[in-house]
Structures are given as C-alpha cells and as structure tokens.
Image: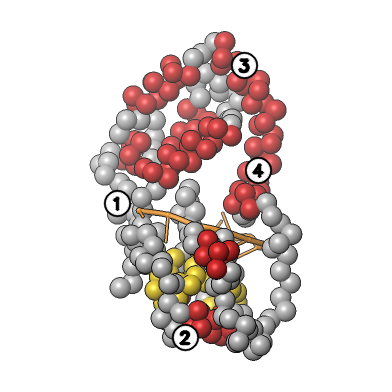
DNA sequence: GTTGAGCGTT
C-alpha cells in the first residue's frame, strides 16, 4: 500500500489533512509516509505535481486518521530535516474538505485542551498577506521568466491576432496541423506545437507566440487535465515514461 | 541540471 492518491481521495470522512511545505522537489509520498506514519495513522499521502512538467510542487498533504496524531506529527516533524530540507508541517486549510473547518469550527486542530502549548516555531509566515493564490501557481518558480515573456508578447498579441484574422482563418491552420500531428498528439504535448517557432509557417517572423488568452488558457488547461496528464502522480516515479510513447516513429520530433 | 512561496487528486 504505497500508492497513495492513485485513485483519488480514499476516505476523507474523519481524516485530518496536514500540509507539508518546504519539502524537496524530489521527495515522494513514499518518503513522507514512513516518516509521518511513525507518529500516527496516516490514511493518505498526496503530493500535488505540476500539470505541465509533472514536477513536484514542493509540498505534500499528509492525511491522518486522528487529529491528536496529526498534531503530534506537526509538532514533531515541523522543522524537521527531510531530504536535506527542513519541512514545514501544518494543518491544511484550503483543502477540499475545508467545509468541516468552517462548519464545525474544528479547525482540524487539536481542541483547546491540548492547544499548541508545546512549542511552536516562530517562523515568519506572510501567507495571509498574499491572498492572490492564482499568482503563486503561475510564478511558482523560474516561471517568472516566462511571465515577463508573456507580457512582452501581450502587445504583439493584438497585432498578431489582427493579422491572422483578416488573412488566415484559424481553422485552416489547425486543420492542417491536426491532420499532420494526428499520431503525434498522443505522445507529444500540445504545448509544444503551440510554442514551436518553426511550426508557424504563416508567421515566421513572430516565431514563438503563444498568444494565450484567458479563455484559451483555461480551456487548454482543462484539456491537459483530462487527457494529457493521466500519468501517475504519487509515490511511483518509476513508470512515468512507460505509458507515454506508443509511437514507434522516431521521427515524431522532427518535422 | 535549474526553482522555494504556498494549500490537493480519481
């Protein structure tokens, strides 16, 4: 039973989710499970991964069966050195089962009886200040470089859109690409053909121009969510590439 | 090979 989150949340009825932050990017659920399981009954361990790269986002969710055990793990593992990084363990708040928190005001934390009378690390937490959660997932990291690049294309986006609106219809370009990449779509990411400068035959000067509109971006994300990223996202990084290369054609990358 | 504030999936 090392596959957590493989089939979604197993049983979230009386479990308490803990948020583990500051973990290594290569830390897996199997690495955290034995660590947290020592302090209590761990029901599930889930590590969110990036949709595009599939890399770990640097935090995990450990679900305990009892709040007291969870609190104990928080107190014991909080600030602990894991994989060379000192992790931060705290109770999850914005989780899917956050309703119980506001309803019963349980806060998923231990009752006032125990309270956090033990010892708490006075770490500076400016999380409440940054309420823009949507901003964090975009510029989570080195993505900032892309962010600036997107802004740069933003001004050209309008010009680019006008050009192709009166000259080339989107259906024409897509129809051709879709026909050619019929078999590539299965193995290749859709982001590639959009970001490939060589693919833009009708606008070689502009080169890479994702021209991402909010609506398009949302749709694109949904597609990636439902079909493009079915890979396992749990403690099994072993067979992540085995199920994504059914094409015997090695020239799929070359045009 | 990179990054480091944060809150999650079938």
Chain containing the residue with disc 4: A
Q: Earlier in the sequence, mark 3 or mark 4?
A: 4
Q: Where is residue A159 in the image (x, y as percent from the top left)?
A: 66, 20
Residue labelled with disc 4: A147
Decide which of A83, A73 is in the foreground and name it: A73
For numbered disc 3, what is the local secondary structure?
Answer: helix
Residue marked by disc 2: A39
Instruction: Name the residue furthest bottom.
Output: A118
In the rendered image, the vertical position of residue A89 relative to residue A119, given as above or below = above
Q: Label 1: chain?
A: A
Q: Residues within 10 Å of mark 4 (few under 14, many from 20)?
A: few
A143 is higher (above) or lower (below) than A61: above
- As measured in the structure, the alpha-carbon distance from the residue carrying label 2 to the one carrying label 1 is 36 Å
**Residues tagged by mark 2 and mark 1 found on one chain of the structure:** yes
Mark sitting earlier along the chain (3/2): 2
**Dot placed on the residue nearer the N-terminal end, 4 or 1:** 4
Residue A243 location, x and y as percent?
Answer: 29, 51
Q: Quadrant of the C terminus of chain A?
A: top left
In the rendered image, residue A100, in percent from the top left (x then y), is placed at 52, 65
Left or right: residue A97 versus residue A113 is: left
Mark 1 vs 3, N-terminal side: 3
Q: Identify the mark nearer the N-term, 2 or 1.
A: 2
Q: How are the residues colored? A: secondary structure
Q: Name the residue under label 3.
A: A162
């Amino acid at each position: 039973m090392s596959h957590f989150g493989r089939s979604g949340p197993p049983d979230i009825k009386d479990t308490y989710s803990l948020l583990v932050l500051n973990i290594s990017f290569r830390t897996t659920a199997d690495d955290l499970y034995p660590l947290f399981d020592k302090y209590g009954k761990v029901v599930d361990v889930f590590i969110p991964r990036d949709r595009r790269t599939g890399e770990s986002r640097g935090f995990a969710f450990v679900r305990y069966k009892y709040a007291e055990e969870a609190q104990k793990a928080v107190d014991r593992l909080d600030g602990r050195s894991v994989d060379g990084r000192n992790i931060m363990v705290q109770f999850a708040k914005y989780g899917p089962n956050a309703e119980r928190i506001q309803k019963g005001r349980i806060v998923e934390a231990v009752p006032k009886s125990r309270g956090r009378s033990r010892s708490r690390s006075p770490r500076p937490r400016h999380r409440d200040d940054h309420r823009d959660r949507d901003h964090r997932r975009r510029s989570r990291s080195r993505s900032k470089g892309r962010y600036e690049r997107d802004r740069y294309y933003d001004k050209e986006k309008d010009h680019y859109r006008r050009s192709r609106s009166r000259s080339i219809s989107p259906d024409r370009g897509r129809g051709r690409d879709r026909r050619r990449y019929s078999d590539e779509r299965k193995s290749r990411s859709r982001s590639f053909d959009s970001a490939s400068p060589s693919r833009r035959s009708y606008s070689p000067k502009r080169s890479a121009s994702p021209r991402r509109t909010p609506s398009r971006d949302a749709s694109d994300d949904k597609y990636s969510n439902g079909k493009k990223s079915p890979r396992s996202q749990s403690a099994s990084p072993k067979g992540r590439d085995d199920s994504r290369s059914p094409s015997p054609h090695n020239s799929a990358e070359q045009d």
